[in-house]
Image (cartoon, rainbow, N blue to C red):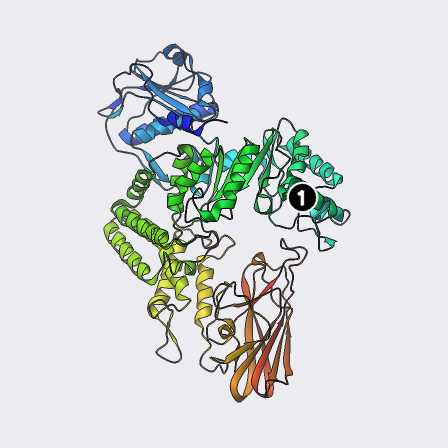
């Protein structure tokens, strides 16, 4: 295994020969150099030459000629890649030392040589030179070229070989080829070319839609029955035959792809049959069964790499078995806390054990790390200080491949900054990350940059002082007592007011500052749903009926409009556009106080609710507040059970209507009830059915939505109202959580 300590030396300036004086490329707007390529230069070398030519022209206005080494040239020349002239000037060059992506920039006399490894090293070398000349690509939309009539390259001899051989940052910017090439990242295009299949492939290779009816024995045995939505039965020899043939067909269709994933589906429903249970016991971990299967597949494709996941229930390394030479282990850190570095956080101890165990078994590990808050993408998520220590930790552990899962094609809090920092760290884990961040902030936000740095530091300091956790599936309200206290929200607001004032008169910078402010505004909007205090509330409760505070409604409108203008399409990984979010909040703002005879009434729950999402128990059904299309706020939840609630109206009263709502969000294990029964009583002991409302919506309807269950009554008079909702209890067989506990969530009960 290559030593991380030794490789770090590759990032230093290495003067191996007496160096020449500086090279004048452009002087006073006049061209002094040409760019030289081999006559048979490949696509990467030609692209590198064009990138350099275009950049110099943008800087100076001068267009350098691009010629081949067959053309006589002046002494002053920039040699791109291997060529006859390069071999004459520098015959000792060893390309193999640069591996796939390393580069060397060296001056010899009045000639500058940019040499690279076999993949894109020479292109990365050109971008490395441009960075040294002051050029920056901070994001896909912000590129800076210093304006000068004179471009001079100082004497240098620089060698850089990135430690990580696979460097992927899953962000929108990194999906842009120009950005990923500038920062030495593996682009989406690279992945699609090199990987035939990319994670969660059991279902693709042995699709239940094709095989389950005839061969249910290929799939998970769970609760005494086979289900199509789980995993494969990996101890069934027929499964391997079917999968290998499907894989072979795909390889014939994509012969250039070198890596193929044979990996579990994205659920925890592993097979519970006797043979699979025996296999787990033999290896001491679920991954032993998977690895035994994958090893057998890999032996049939010795010229390909077969990748598999160590993820969730398969994360723990097995005993008594090791990956084959051509098996890649994709180790996932999804459970880790993000507020402290993995290598020192007690909450990440079990993951560290798994990293150590897998590192002892394999030299081919790709770590899949998670670096944004997926449940609330546009929400403050102060994890920037753990990025470098975590990447250093993986490097020390012998990991040479990294996939940093960001927000993908979505836009998240500081997603451009995160992508930029991660790109620099994947190339060089020892980079001065503070300097990199300051450079980005100043280059992106102009005079507002120092203010935004102050905001970032204050939030990270508050999290560290509270020693609270940071969950990638968290909510702003979770941080009410750590980095999003009411006092801090006031201070953050003041800082952003100052940032906007600093950027006034600079339209582009001001727009970027306002986009950077969106997470703070989102946090204030979300926390205010919980009625924290008079300032953090949507309502003025000093009047009856409650009145929505105009300032909060304006804040909601401004947030949605700015988010849409910024191109934000989703506020969370599963969906919800800014417009849908605004509509959901507006739904909640229609309080049920005036005319609602159940408002403030005592509620007795006959079935136990869940405290996983506390909303005050049964009182949430009569507090006058409706919930948005988000089960975390003002929805009373029941996990794996029915709902039975009795509401005491305080006195006998005429009732003409009873109404409530339930939520469906099956990707979160939440379904509408099968039916809702309304009952009434005078004494609270003897109830009569007043109405039965059946659900007519399909369990498979996607998205997050609520549905009303209401009934008009005739001549009803009662003191007590009972609401009974019948849950489906367990996730259906088609669902990834098949057999697991299903939820129902109930909103406000309105009695008129």
Question: Where residue 615 sits: x, y (%)?
Answer: 48, 68
**Extreme residue in the right direction:** 214
Q: Is residue 409 visible?
A: no
**Extreme residue in the left direction:** 28
Indicate left or right for 38 with 550 as reference.
right
* Residue 472 falls within the magenta-colored stretch: yes
Q: Quadrant of residue 542?
A: bottom left
Instruction: Specify start and end residues of the magenta stretch as a single range.
Output: 469-474
Main secondary structure along the magenta-highlighted residues: loop
Q: Quadrant of residue 73?
A: top left
Q: Is residue 684 visible?
A: yes
Q: Residue at x 39, y 51 (%)?
A: 566
Q: Residue at x 30, y 39 (%)?
A: 439
**Residue 219 or 667: which is nearer the viewer?**
219
Q: Which residue is mark 1?
A: 280
Indicate left or right for 54 with 501 as reference.
right
Question: Where residue 171 sits: x, y (%)?
Answer: 45, 43
Indicate left or right for 508 with 345 as reference.
left
Label tally: 1
Question: Where residue 213 sits: x, y (%)?
Answer: 76, 50
* Vertical relation: 499 (above or below) 58: below
Question: Where residue 710 sits: x, y (%)?
Answer: 58, 76
* Residue 700 falls within the magenta-colored stretch: no
Dot 1 surroundings within 10 Å: few (below 14), some, or many (20 or more)? some
Q: Residue at x 57, y 41 (%)?
A: 310
Q: Secondary structure at mark 1?
A: helix
């Amino acid at each position: 295994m290559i030593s991380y300590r030794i490789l770090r030396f590759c990032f230093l300036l290495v003067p191996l020969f007496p160096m020449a004086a500086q090279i004048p490329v452009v002087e006073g707007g006049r061209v002094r150099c040409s760019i030289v390529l081999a006559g048979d230069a490949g696509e990467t070398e030609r692209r590198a030459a064009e990138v350099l030519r275009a950049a110099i022209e943008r800087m100076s206005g001068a267009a350098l000629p691009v010629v081949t080494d067959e053309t006589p040239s002046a002494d002053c020349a920039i040699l791109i890649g291997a060529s006859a002239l390069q071999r004459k000037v520098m015959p000792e060059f060893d390309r193999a030392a640069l591996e796939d992506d390393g580069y060397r920039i060296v001056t010899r006399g009045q000639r500058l040589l940019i040499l690279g490894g076999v993949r894109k090293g020479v292109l990365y070398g050109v971008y490395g030179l441009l960075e040294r000349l002051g050029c920056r690509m901070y994001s896909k939309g912000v590129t800076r070229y210093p304006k000068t009539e004179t471009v001079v390259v100082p004497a240098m001899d620089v060698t850089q070989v990135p430690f990580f051989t696979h460097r992927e940052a899953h962000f929108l910017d990194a999906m842009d080829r120009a950005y990923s090439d500038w920062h030495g990242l593996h682009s989406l295009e690279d992945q699609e070319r090199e990987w035939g299949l990319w994670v969660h492939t059991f279902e693709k290779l042995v699709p239940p839609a094709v095989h389950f009816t005839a061969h249910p024995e290929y799939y998970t045995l769970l609760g005494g029955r086979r289900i199509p939505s789980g995993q494969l039965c990996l101890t069934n020899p027929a499964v391997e035959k079917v999968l290998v043939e499907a894989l072979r067909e795909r390889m014939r269709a994509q012969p250039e792809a070198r890596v193929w994933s044979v990996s579990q589906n994205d659920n925890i429903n592993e097979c519970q049959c006797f043979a699979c249970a025996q296999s787990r016991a033999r290896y001491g971990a679920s991954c032993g069964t998977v690895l035994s299967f994958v090893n057998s597949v890999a032996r049939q494709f010795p010229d390909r790499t077969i990748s598999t996941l160590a993820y969730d229930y398969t994360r723990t390394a097995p005993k008594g078995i090791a990956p084959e030479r051509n098996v890649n282990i994709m180790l996932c850190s999804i459970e880790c806390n993000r507020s402290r570095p993995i290598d020192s956080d007690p909450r990440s101890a079990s993951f560290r054990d798994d990293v150590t165990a897998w590192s002892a078994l394999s030299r081919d590990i790709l770590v899949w790390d998670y670096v944004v808050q997926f449940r609330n993408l546009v929400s403050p998520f102060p994890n920037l200080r753990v990025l470098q220590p975590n990447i250093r930790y993986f490097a020390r552990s012998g990991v040479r491949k990294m996939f940093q899962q960001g927000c993908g094609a979505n836009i998240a809090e500081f997603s451009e900054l995160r992508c930029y920092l991660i790109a620099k760290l994947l190339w060089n884990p020892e980079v001065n990350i503070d300097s990199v961040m300051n450079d980005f902030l100043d280059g992106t936000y102009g005079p507002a940059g120092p203010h935004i740095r102050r905001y970032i530091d204050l939030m990270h300091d508050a999290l560290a002082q509270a020693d609270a956790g940071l969950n990638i599936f968290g909510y702003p309200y979770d941080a009410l007592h750590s980095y999003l206290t009411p006092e801090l929200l006031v201070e953050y607001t003041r800082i952003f007011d100052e940032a906007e004032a600093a950027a006034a008169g600079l339209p582009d910078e001001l727009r970027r500052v306002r986009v950077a402010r969106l997470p703070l505004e989102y946090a204030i909007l979300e926390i205010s749903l919980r009625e924290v205090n008079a300032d953090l509330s949507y309502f003025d409760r000093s009047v009856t009926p409650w009145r929505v505070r105009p300032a909060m409604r304006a804040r909601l409108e401004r947030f949605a409009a700015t988010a849409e203008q910024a191109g934000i399409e989703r506020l969370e990984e599963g969906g919800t556009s800014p417009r849908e979010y605004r509509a959901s909040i507006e739904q909640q703002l229609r309080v049920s106080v005036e005319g609602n005879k159940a408002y403030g009434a005592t509620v007795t729950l006959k079935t136990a609710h869940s405290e996983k999402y506390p909303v005050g128990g049964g009182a949430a059904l009569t507090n006058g507040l409706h919930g948005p299309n988000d089960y975390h706020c003002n929805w009373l939840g029941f996990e794996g059970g029915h709902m039975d609630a009795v509401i005491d109206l305080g006195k006998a009263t005429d009732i003409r209507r009873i109404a409530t709502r339930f939520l469906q969000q099956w990707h979160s294990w939440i379904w509408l009830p099968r039916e809702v029964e309304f009952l009434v009583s005078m004494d609270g002991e003897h109830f009569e059915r007043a109405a039965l409302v059946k659900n007519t919506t399909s369990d498979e309807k996607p998205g997050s939505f609520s549905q009303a269950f209401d009934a008009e009554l005739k001549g009803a008079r009662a003191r007590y109202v009972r609401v009974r909702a019948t849950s489906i209890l367990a996730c259906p067989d088609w669902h990834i959580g098949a057999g697991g506990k299903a939820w129902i969530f109930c909103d406000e009960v309105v009695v008129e």
